[in-house]
Image (cartoon, rainbow, N blue to C red):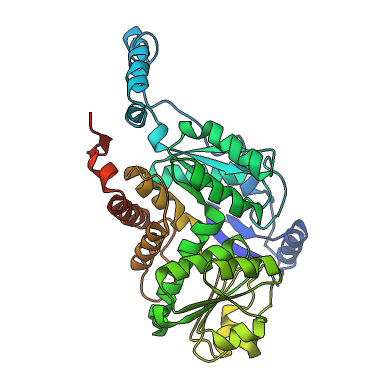
Amino acid sequence: MAGGDIGDVTTIKIGPLSTVRDITVHCESDEQLDDVVEAIKKLESGIFVHAVSDDVLRAHEGGKIHMTSRMDIRSLADLRRVYTPGVANVCRVIQEDPEKARYYTSIGNSVAIITDGTAILGLGNIGPLAGMPVMEGKAALFDRFAGISGIPILLDTSNPDEVVRTVKNIYKGFGGILLEDIGSPHCFEIEERLKEEIPIPVMHDDQHGTAVVTLAAVISACRSAGVTLKEAVVGQIGLGAAGLAICRMFMAYGVREMCGVDRQPAALDRLAGYGGTPLDSLEDLMSRCNIVIATTGVPGLIRPEMICRGQVILALSNPKPEIEPEDALKAGAAFAADGRSVNNVLGFPGIFRGALNARASQITHSMLVAAARAISNCTSHGEIVPHPLDPKVHVEVARAVEQVASQENPKKSKEKVNGSPLK
């Protein structure tokens, strides 16, 4: 009745007169937590709340990541190999052939996770320092699913010139750049300029990571609904960073027509510039499109009477979608889902693993489409996407991206032997 979402239930102690259980309840606010506790207290006699704690805060104590050495340094001989004097010879080798830095250092397996803190999750512009827990989370996921060292970089500026200048001054220490939680519209300029001005892969996860997983979800949804995606008219409601990237991704996939609506004329102009079809109203889009995707952050924006029979509806805003899936299905949709399962973690670790393996200089739309297909191919019947903790998904995404990247740049692919540059 209080609206809390029950998670894990763990039995702590079973005694002759009582049982103690640790019950996780996900609440949207402190007020809701208080309501949940009060509701429990009003249950039948014999049920007591012993203590309330915040497991999320406790899990973040001391941070989620830590840099460690891959070398065991226990003797003077170890010290001489790892540091002075032996390391000087490695420096000379790299000085003579800079490409060997990828082989003899961690650069080729490191990704900078860069934010200015202007679009942190659903919290908005809370600043880079408050966004650090998200960056640490990205780093932990990089390590867990792709074996990549993710290094958070917090920028105390949102000026595109300063951001680009800073990244250009540090990029040589990394194999790739992941832009994270950088707001619209300056995120577009920053990413486009970095892709042009530095020779390593750059990806804005809020744009392309979201677009990859969304495309994978729609491929799976169309399979369940018996819809041919490439012959469909797709509508995108909301043309911010994620929405525009979704449009570009679907156009790269080859849909017949990509439509979009947004309150900002500049966003509609960007869609038109990419080859999409701007529409005048939400009602026009809903009546015209076979597949509808929404990323507006406005709960209840899509009314049941707007649904056309047989449509595929993905209302992806969290925590409250533009329309509840059950309401869309009741109104006649052939398939409907919200954004709870459409998680970027299905994409970015494998995308960068594949790009780094192939020594790609950029992440292309062909590589991203391959990633989306790989995710969809790992999806069980009746599901929209695979479980994000399934290690097979990340292996398949990395393999698909590496294959396309190697085809696009066969010269660099031939320079590798067992994952290392030829000497």
Q: In the drawing, does residue 347 fall left or right of residue 406?
A: right
| Residue at the image point whose x is 26% and y is 39% from the top | 419
**Closer to us: 393 or 124:** 124
| Residue at the image point whose x is 62% and y is 48% from the top | 56
Q: Pick the quarter of the image with the N terminus.
A: bottom right
**The quarter of the displayed image where residue 76 is located:** top left
| Residue at the image point whose x is 54% and y is 36% from the top | 168
Question: Taking 158 as reference, is 392 above or below it?
Answer: below
Residue with the most extreme front position: 273
Residue 9 at what x, y percent from top left?
54, 59
Question: Taking 87 as reference, is 179 above or below it?
Answer: below
Residue 3 shows in the view: no
| Residue at the image point whose x is 60% and y is 57% from the top | 24
Question: Taking 1 as reference, is 123 above or below it?
Answer: above
Residue 283 at what x, y percent from top left?
65, 85
Question: Taking 398 as reference, is 383 above or below it?
Answer: below
